[in-house]
Structures are given as structure tokens and as C-alpha cells.
Image: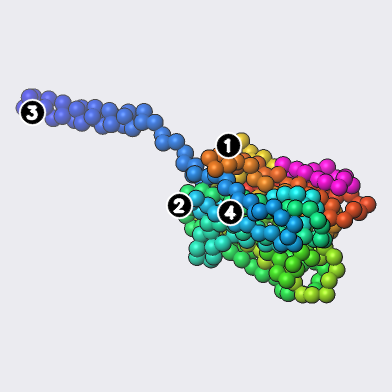
Amino acid sequence: MRDQKDSRRFGARAGGLVLGLAVAGAVVVPASPASAAVPGLVRIAATSASTSNDFQAVTATCPAGKVLTGAGYVLNGATGEAVVDDFRPNGGPATAPTAVTVGAYEAEAFAGNWSVTAYAVCANPLAGLVRVSVTGASASSDFQSTTATCPAGKVLTGTGFELNGATGEGVVDDFRPNGGPATAPTAVTVGAYEAEAFAGNWSVTAYAICANPLAGLVRATATSAVTSDDFQSITTACPAGKVLTGAGFELNGATGEAVVDDFRPNGGPAAAPSTVNVGAYEEDAFAGTWSSTSFGICATA
């Protein structure tokens, strides 16, 4: 009997030892590193021919297998003499965007050559990525505004706009994602003024690029000094450890008298963007003071 008891006791102890080793082994296994919220993030650029045409347009397309999370643009050589009329990501309510088209008109005819650069911020496919659009009423009002909101449960990664029927007579003054330094954005508001009064009807379309929630998504902000300078510039940098998926801007106090000429995410075809620069010119000189705000939409790198 003693041999049988010892055998049972030994067996119980052995089982406990094996279990202990298994638990100890589980404790020392290293944790997997956190996944990037937007893997494969890069910035692609495309530039139109430099001409003196009244209208210029160009499309930047993501590399095969990548999708568009956000976008930017630069007007080269226009220095306040041209306005962006179309800043349009493709895609739809059930289709991920993969490209952005930028179209701009001369606000007033000038003899110099100029061109348009479109920037596409692209990543490996993101879950639930779609493009939402909302168009405001068509009217002859001096100011038009509309907001595009992501579907319930999704967050905003990027933005776009379009002025319908303005053909160079409208200026986007407010291109503002919501959210904050601890809050994920979910909508973008687009507000535009008539650059010069005109009789025709026109409207504003806001585009929201939306995805399933992303780790660490926030909205970062920076604002330039308030001055009466002809040119204002400000750069927003994502917080440490985050990358830029999209952006926005706001002109404070200009009310249609200034145009954003430079809306440029940094990065490149092998480098993720982490900042956005907003540069704006007075379209016509005016005495008032004004400033520029840049917004960065940032997620965990």
C-alpha cells in the first residue's frame, strides 16, 4: 500500500512540476511588437506640365496594392494667382480610394507659367477604407459650407474637397477635420468664399476618407502668428511615434482674401510622412491681419 501511495503522490507532484514549467515558460515568452496602424505608408507625387493655361490638373495614383489614406497639393509658380477648385480622392461609399486629382484655375489671368503637384499618401490596405462625399446646396451666396461625416464606427484618415460651378471664383478658407490631441477625427468641414463676387450658383463638396478605427489616431494642430504679411506658412508635426495619414487647414481672418498655395505632406516613395506644411498667399492685398492653421491626422507608426 505504501508503494501505491508513494506512486500516487509522486505522480501528483510530477504533474504539478510539469504545469509549473509550462506556466513559467509562458511568462518568459516575449510579447509580439505592436503592429503599425498604417503599414507601408508612403507619399507619392505627380506634377502637371508647366504652362500659362488658365486651368491645370494632375492625378497622383498609389502604387499597385496600396490605398489612399490622405492627400496634399502644391501650386508651383502661381504665388497666390491660382486657386484649387478640385481636390478629389477617387473611391466611393463601398470602394477604397487609390488616387487623388488636383485641379486649379487662375484666379486672375497672368502671363507666367505654373503647374500643379498632387500628393497621394498611400498605405497597405486598411480594413473598412471608403470615401464618403457630401455636397451642399447650390446657391449664389458669398460663403458656402458643408461637412462630410464618416459612417458610424469609422474614423477619418484623410480629406478632400470640390467647388462645383465656381471655376476659379471660389476660395477654400476652412478645410477642418474634427478631433483633437486625444480624440480621433470622424468628420471634415469645408467652407469656401467667393474670391470675387459673381452671379452664378455654386456649391461645395466635402470628401471624407474613412476606415475602421486605427491605433493612436488623433488630430494635431499648429497656427502661425497673426500678421498682415502677404504670405503665411505653418507646419504641423505628428506626435513622436506617429505618422501622418492625412491633413487639413484653416485660414483665420482672411475671409476669402487668401489662398492656400502649398498643402504639402512630407515623406516620399520610400518614407512615411509625419508633417504637413500649409502656405498661403493674399490673393489681393488687404490691410487686415490673418493667420494659417495646419491640421495633421496622425496614427501610431
Question: At x 58% / y 36%, what residue is drawn?
Answer: 241
Residue with the mark numbered 2: 65
Give left or right: position of 192 versus 99: right
Tag nearer the camera, 4 or 1 = 4
Q: Which tag, 1 or 2, sits closer to the chain's start?
A: 2
Residue range in magenta is 222-235
Residue with the mark numbered 4: 60
Tag nearer the camera, 1 or 2 = 2
Label 3, residues with CA under 10 Å away: few <14, some 14-19, many ≥20: few
Give left or right: position of 203 versus 232: left
Q: Which tag, 2 or 3, sits closer to the chain's start?
A: 3
Label 1, residues with CA under 10 Å away: few <14, some 14-19, many ≥20: few
Residue with the mark numbered 1: 241
Q: SS of the residue at dot 2? A: loop
Would residue 171 be seen by someone viewing this image from the given angle?
A: no
Question: At x 73% / y 60%, what residue is drawn?
Answer: 53
Quarter of the image that includes the N terminus:
top left
Q: Looking at the picture, how far across and down is residue 204, in whole percent?
A: 71, 67
Cβ atoms under marks 4 and 2 closer than 8 Å: no
Tag nearer the camera, 1 or 3 = 1
Q: Residue furthest right?
A: 287
Residue type, numbered disc 3: Gln
Nearer to me, 186 or 76: 76
Instruction: Tell me the tag on residue 227.
Output: none
* Residue 283 image-quadrant placement: bottom right
Label 4, residues with CA under 10 Å away: few <14, some 14-19, many ≥20: many
Residue with the mark numbered 3: 4
Q: Which tag, 4 or 2, sits closer to the chain's start?
A: 4
